Image (spheres, rainbow, N blue to C red):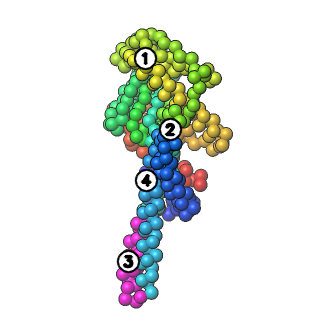
Amino acid sequence: MPSSGHSGIGLREGLGMLDQQKMDQIRHRCSEIEARMAMKEHVAEIAALSREYNRLMPIVDRINQLERIRSDIESVREMLGSPELREMAQEEIAVLAGRQSACEDALTDLLLADDPDNQRSVVLEIRAGTGGEEAALFSSDLYAMYERYCALRTWKFRPLDASETALGGFREVVVIVEGQGAYHRLKYESGVHRVQRVPETESGGRIHTSAATVAVLPQAEDVDVRIRPEDIRVETMRASGAGGQHVNTTDSAVRITHIPTGITVLSSEKSQHRNRAQAMTVLRSRLYRQKAEEAASERAADRKMQVGSGDRSERVRTYNFPQGRLTDHRINLTLYKLEQVLQGNLDEIIDALIADERMRALART
């Protein structure tokens, strides 16, 4: 399991991230955003500007703290020339140097984690893969796991649409997760999740392997993706599938098709107006993710990171029920805590994935 901490020397040797020019650019951008938010002509951009400002402010606070410590060190250095004050000055410099190291490490971590989408809410999609009915039942288990995790985080978990099987599994389910930092933590769940267990439908006691895919999309807003009215087709219908405990059957389900890409979204809540709004949210998020992935592919197709890439074709995790074992293949992490994980206790895994991603980022710089 990767360490969740880093040595200060390793960070500063591995990164050229703390140069004065970069820090000045970040502070200048923060001041620029403050000015734009105060101007009435930028009202339409307030949401995006506010999100960027909230992302940058913790970094600016650390930069200011670091500069105060550096200034204090320079002031104390002036005392080294005095024989009476030299010993006291050396002790003070040692204390301040420790604070400087800790502050630089914290600032570097903030810069490494500076994904502009991190603070967004999430569109979470779970689909049954290979394995038939057992895969659908496993999709339902994943749904319950994420619902419990979001409850522990006090995030809102709103099912948008589901296609259920007769045994209560999910062929497909789409959920909106609302909460600050939801994407930062849930984005590592994207990929193929594999289960090994004796299915409820298996009379011979044989262990089967099935799979489900999880997609985590940062929730996009109007300012992120512009969708022309003529590019969508909106249909109203009765919701298909079993309905049941997760999504109410309704005559006002809305299906929106984005004609240029063929992307189709369905929302099946009781309110037709709300269904249209939520379907548009999911559509924008899928288009936003598609646009981001295309840009990333063009920039650096050969430098794709396994962790956090969002590639749903990659196997990310195996849930072995007979042994009570969970393995995350991206970081070779194995935990014999399967039941706790299924109850929503995902933080140990997610924290390890975040630490691994940061160490990979350090190695690339």
Q: Mark 3 — residue?
A: 91
Q: Say which residue appears at 52% left-offset and 42% top-offset.
A: 41
Up-down relation of residue 237 to residue 219 (above or below):
above
What percent of the width, then of the height, locates residue 183? 46, 38
The three-letter amino acid code for the residue at tag 4 is Pro
Q: Position of residue 30 (x, y in %)?
A: 49, 53
Vertical placement of 252 versus 16: above or below? above
Label 1 secondary element: helix
The residue where tag 1 is placed is 272
Q: Tell me what residue is drawn at x 53 percent, y 59 percent.
A: 23
Is residue 89 inside the magenta stretch?
yes
Residue of label 4: 58
Cβ–Cβ below 8 Å for labels 2 and 3? no
Q: CA distance from mark 4 to mark 1?
A: 40 Å
Circle 4 SS class: helix
Compare marks 2 and 4 and give the one earlier in the sequence.
2
Q: Position of residue 311 (x, y in %)?
A: 56, 33
Residue position marked by numbered label 2 in the rendering: 44
